[in-house]
């Protein structure tokens, strides 16, 4: 087998959800594909790293030539309700319910010292700045149910008290409807019910 083909199979096999045989099949699909498609595919991969930045307010993904994402720059959105999620995909799942008109804050991780993820690795500074700029805020912790997120929720609560923001912040979290699942995989009805029944903590 030509070296470049072996290399391609090897690179594809490093992707998640790819088995050995599917790596080979995909490599042969690419080998036989139309050259315009291949050029476009390769260019998109390079652009992916160069043309995606983070929103300066909420840490969401956006085109490199913009400062703020579509949600943060939308005046129709409720900027006094901030839904906190771990990842961009969690935000997408909630947005896909078409049910809520608030804003988001993407922390990027949950605090987990055992995995070398500490407070300073998360996108907290802009979150507290946003809260300080609002006269009143509801923070919704739309987080996956695990010990790392318990620690993260505790940190947010303590930090709000330390910064004398307690009187103007309500912190809520999702009800138990999706307690056994990850938000990314929850169906729309469960997600909507879980958010509707959110409880103050
Ligand atoms: Zn944003």
Image (cartoon, helix red, strand yellow):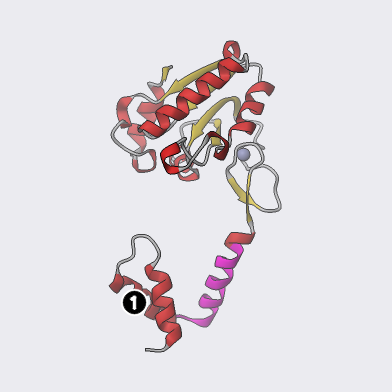
Quadrant in the picture for the N terminus: bottom left
- The one of 148 and 183 positioned closer to us in this rendering: 148
- The one of 190 and 60 positioned closer to us in this rendering: 60
Disc 1 under 8 Å from ligand 1? The reply is no
Q: Residue 124's spot in the image, x, y percent?
A: 59, 32
Q: Residue 172's spot in the image, x, y percent?
A: 45, 20
| Disc 1 target residue | 24
- Magenta span contains residue 111: no
Q: Residue 62's spot in the image, x, y percent?
A: 62, 49
Quadrant in the picture for the C terminus: top left
**Position above or below: 36 against 95:** below
**Position above or below: 20 against 106:** below
> Which residue sits at x=56%, y=21%?
159
Q: Which residues are magenta?
A: 33-47
Q: On the rendering, which quadrant does ligand 1 occupy?
A: top right
Task: Characterize the magenta stretch by its predominant secondary structure.
Answer: helix
Q: Is residue 63 left or right of residue 112?
A: right
> Which residue sits at x=51%, y=30%?
83
- The one of 22 and 2 positioned closer to us in this rendering: 2
């Amino acid at each position: 087998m030509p070296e470049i083909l072996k290399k391609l199979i090897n690179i594809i096999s490093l992707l998640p959800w790819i088995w050995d045989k599917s790596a080979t099949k995909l490599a042969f699909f690419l080998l036989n594909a139309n050259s315009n498609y291949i050029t476009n595919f390769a260019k998109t991969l390079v652009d992916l790293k160069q043309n995606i930045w983070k929103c300066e307010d909420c840490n969401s993904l956006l085109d490199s030539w913009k400062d703020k994402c579509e949600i943060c720059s939308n005046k129709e959105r409720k900027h006094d309700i901030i839904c906190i999620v771990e990842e961009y995909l969690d935000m997408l799942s909630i947005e896909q319910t078409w049910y809520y008109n608030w804003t988001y804050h993407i922390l990027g991780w949950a605090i987990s010292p055992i995995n070398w993820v500490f407070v300073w690795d998360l996108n907290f500074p802009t979150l507290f700045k946003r809260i300080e700029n609002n006269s009143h805020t509801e923070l919704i912790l739309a987080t996956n149910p695990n010990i790392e997120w318990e620690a993260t929720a505790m940190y947010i609560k303590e930090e709000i008290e330390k910064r004398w923001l307690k009187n103007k912040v309500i912190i809520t979290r999702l009800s138990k409807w999706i307690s056994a699942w990850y938000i990314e995989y929850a169906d729309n009805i469960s997600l909507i019910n879980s958010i509707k029944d959110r409880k103050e903590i």
